Image: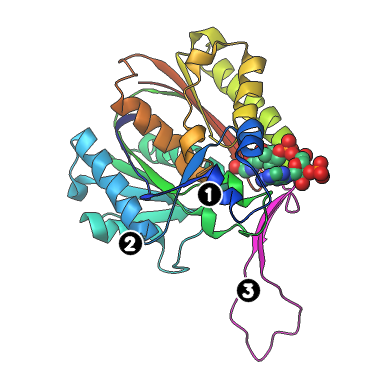
Amino acid sequence: MKISGTGSALPRKIVTNDMLAQFLDTSDEWIRTRTGVTSRHVISDEKLEDLAREAAEKALLDAGVRADDLDFIICSNVVNEYITPQLSCIIQGAIGATCPCIDINCACAGFIHALEIAESFYKAGKVENVLIVCAEEPTRMADWKDRRTCVLFGDGAGAAVLTPGDNIKSIKLSAMTATDKLWQMRMLQPTPYITKEETETPLQMKGQEVFKFAVTAASRDITRALEESSMSAEDIDYYLLHQANIRIINSIQNYLKQPAEKFPTNVESHGNSSSASCPILIDECNRKGMFRKGDKIAVSAFGAGFVSGAVVFEW
Ligand code: UT7
């Protein structure tokens, strides 16, 4: 398969660090130096499914594929207002597709997991055109009184249309359970039979442990994907990394010993938009005309679970 089209959509509301400092014990200086983030797009009056539809329609247009020619839709999403039906089915109707669809929740690494699933569909000869949409509103997961988490996130949707090709060189996924490092719990409806204690907890994070996992996992996944592709770090034209923290990106760059120009970022103006982060970055680079046919690209992401993954492909 190959990526034939990309799209993205962001909420209108832009929240700067200074705006956060008006109600949180934080500062632009702390957020910028510790994370690289200056502002983020935050959902206010939009619905996430509308951003997902917009990103999907842009990707279809870019690929020149019609919605009714899609054979499968994979939506990566951690939370949205609906528990059921699944977001992919809402997107299917909104864009006028009729194909089957599934949702996956692989936290911030959802885009790479979606590519892996899609690739197995291609290898099985089951599909011609696949739509991946990663739509996330992590700002609805954080406690906005907790300066350690809420300053990190932004919302948005990123999409990619896949068509037949031989451009994916390697995909590597990993999982390592760590339920106490990055988690959130919601309360389900009560029943007359529930006797266990249940609580609702906003997003909790052991930041430094997540940081260490992120650098180790991404460095390892990229190395493995390069090995499987018979490529060296030098062969890659662009490293598009999950936009969680500029310091994490810099650490991975140092590990790979590659120049900063190979690592485009948007964490400065987007924050961490979970699984939407990679496809939004890919779309922004694509629309700037950065990629040339044949460019070698590595994408890597990590997140709650812990899960992680990297893909090496040719543009
Ligand atoms: O998609 C995956 C999701 N998560 C991540 O990728 C997060 C990975 N981790 C990180 O990016 C970093 O660990 C953070 C940015 C979350 C935190 O940076 P840090 O350098 O690890 O800071 P820290 O947690 O060690 O906190 C240092 C100090 C603490 O104060 P004390 O205890 O030293 O007095 C915090 O309370 O900074 C304080 N602090 C803040 N101060 C101002 C924490 N958050 C803030 C804040 N503003 N927003």
In this view, the mark in front (3 or 1): 1
From mark 2 to mark 1, how far is it between C-alphas?
33 Å
CB contact under 8 Å: marks 2 and 1:
no
Question: Is 265 on the left-hand or right-hand side of 10?
Answer: right
Q: Earlier in the sequence, mark 3 or mark 1?
A: 1
- Magenta segment: 177-206
Say if residue 119 shows up in the picture.
no
In this view, the mark in front (3 or 2): 3
**Dot 1 amino acid type:** Met
Name the spot of residue 248 as percent of width and height, x first. Answer: 64, 29
Camera-side residue of 100 and 277: 277
Say if residue 286 shows up in the picture.
yes
For label 1, being within 8 Å of ligand 1 is answered: no
Residue at numbered disc 2: 90
184 within the magenta span: yes
Q: Earlier in the sequence, mark 2 or mark 1?
A: 1
Q: Which quadrant would the C terminus be assigned to in this image? A: top left
Q: Which quadrant would the N terminus be assigned to in this image? A: top left
Q: Secondary structure at mark 2?
A: helix
Name the spot of residue 243 as percent of width and height, x first. Answer: 53, 34
Residue at numbered disc 1: 19
Question: Is 211 on the left-hand or right-hand side of 237?
Answer: right
CB contact under 8 Å: marks 3 and 2:
no
CB contact under 8 Å: marks 3 and 1:
no
Camera-side residue of 89 and 258: 258
Q: Secondary structure at mark 3?
A: loop
In the depicted structure, whether residue 281 falls above or below residue 78: above
From mark 3 to mark 1, how far is it between C-alphas?
31 Å
